[in-house]
Amino acid sequence: MQLLSTLDPDFEARFARIVADRRESASDVAASVAAILSAVKSRGDEALLEYTARFDHHHIGSEADWKIAPEACAAAYESLDKDLREALDLAAARIRAYHEAQLPENRDYRDEAGVRLGAIWRAVDAAGLYVPGGRAAYPSSLLMNAIPAKVAGVSRLAVCTPTPHGQTTPLVLAAAHVAGVDEIWRIGGAQAVGALAYGTGRIGAVDVITGPGNAWVAEAKRQLYGVVGIDMVAGPSEILVIADGDNDPDWIAADLLSQAEHDPTAQSILITDDAAFAALVEDSVTLQASQLSTEAVARESWETNGVVIVVGDLAREAPELANRLAAEHVELAIAEPDAMLRTIRHAGSVFLGRMTPEAIGDYVGGPNHVLPTGRRARFSSGLSVLDFMKRTSFLELSEAAFRAIGPAAATLAHAEGLPAHARSVELRRR
């Protein structure tokens, strides 16, 4: 863990290194992913059979080996303990309500020249969602990806998820039932992303692919952008907590560990104006990490990538540092967070006050937890219904409107050396 103070003479150099460190996998998987995608594109289902047997040890034979039936998802939901089922329902309801409020409105109006203008928003026809297996098989992630697609009006939502040795994760199946997923395919890895993008004999192609995954999945999405739309190529999780000394250090330590336990490359950063409080938080992180079932991952993340920054003036210095970090999650654990919120320009999502841990946002808050990482919050946003929609503009001119603006179009076309453009306007002026 790194300890920095803005009073240190080398602070700027050390902080700049933290900002520049992307912590993303150094392994070169691009060539392997390209070969997998090529095989899926050319050989379709045959390639899926081979890769699924090789990587997931799942040998596809019958139809049940290809797909998970809706009845299995419904049964998984019904088998949940009452508290867990109610928690899943609450999360889905809150996510759905928040994203329904994001739906854009169509426009249709006439301007002062009499020109009719507007735009129509429509959902894509089909969307694909990648759901990881193994350690990262999170039902909350399925809800966060699937529900916005359904709210947007996507008519076909296909999920691909690996089932190692044929084993499924019941809670993920239950989440798929709650979200209204249409298809669930037992395919994982880069080959699943290729199947969704290109289509195979069994799996129909989609227009947009979202969802988290390992380095191979992320690289496949990157290579296929343009063939399909994607949500983002996300990196390791990150949290920035801005906290004054009036907080309970155990609370803040737990918040830092909530992201550290995701992955050894995750990063947790604390900015505070109280050095004594910072020391208490550090001690609590060490103690709490030892009590976690995820101790090994959380401890490696904290020891390798954790940062504590002590500043002299929290209100003045913390926002500038936060904007340079452009973190995925930012907690403002201070008495009056609204004022600081107005100065935080770059963040995936912001959590206001002492009673709003980031973990609430991961599950039941409502806003999407699929957020930009690696300083991408400078130019991108979290997943929303707009990722599953596209806008078509339209234009209509009456004769009077054409006379008002047409000549200028012809003049600009001639200036650009495009006479056919100009003629298409000028012929209508005769």
Image (spheres, rainbow, N blue to C red):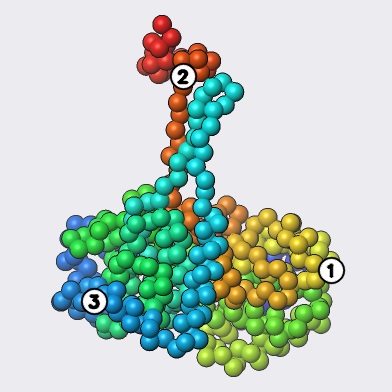
* Residue type at tag 1: Gly
Residue 15, x across and y down, in percent = 69, 65
The outermost residue toward the top is 430
Q: Is residue 120 above or below residue 91?
A: above
- Please give the label number shown on residue 54: 3
Give the structural element (helix, strand or loop) at label 2. loop
Residue 258, x across and y down, in percent = 59, 79
**Near-viewer residue (104 or 320):** 104
Classify residue 27 by image quadrant: bottom left
* Residue type at tag 3: Arg
Task: Specify which label sits upstream in the sequence, 1 or 2.
Answer: 1
**Near-viewer residue (132 or 429):** 429
Residue 85, x across and y down, in percent = 46, 82
Give the structural element (helix, strand or loop) at label 1. loop
Q: Residue at x 34, y 52 (%)?
A: 125
Q: Quadrant of the N terminus?
A: bottom right
Instruction: Kindly indicate whether the residue at mark 2 contacts the one at mark 1 (C-beta within 8 angstroms).
Output: no
Task: Specify which label sits upstream in the sequence, 3 or 2.
Answer: 3
**Near-viewer residue (353 or 272):** 353
Residue 31, x across and y down, in percent = 32, 61
Q: Which residue is mark 2?
A: 398
Q: Residue at x 34, y 57 (%)?
A: 155
Task: Specify which label sits upstream in the sequence, 3 or 1.
Answer: 3
Q: Which residue is mark 1?
A: 312
* Residue type at tag 2: Ser
Give the structural element (helix, strand or loop) at label 3. helix
- Please give the label number shown on residue 196: none
Q: CA distance from mark 1 to mark 2?
A: 64 Å
Q: Which numbered disc, 3 or 2, marks the residue closer to the eye?
A: 2
Q: Residue at x 38, y 56 (%)?
A: 154
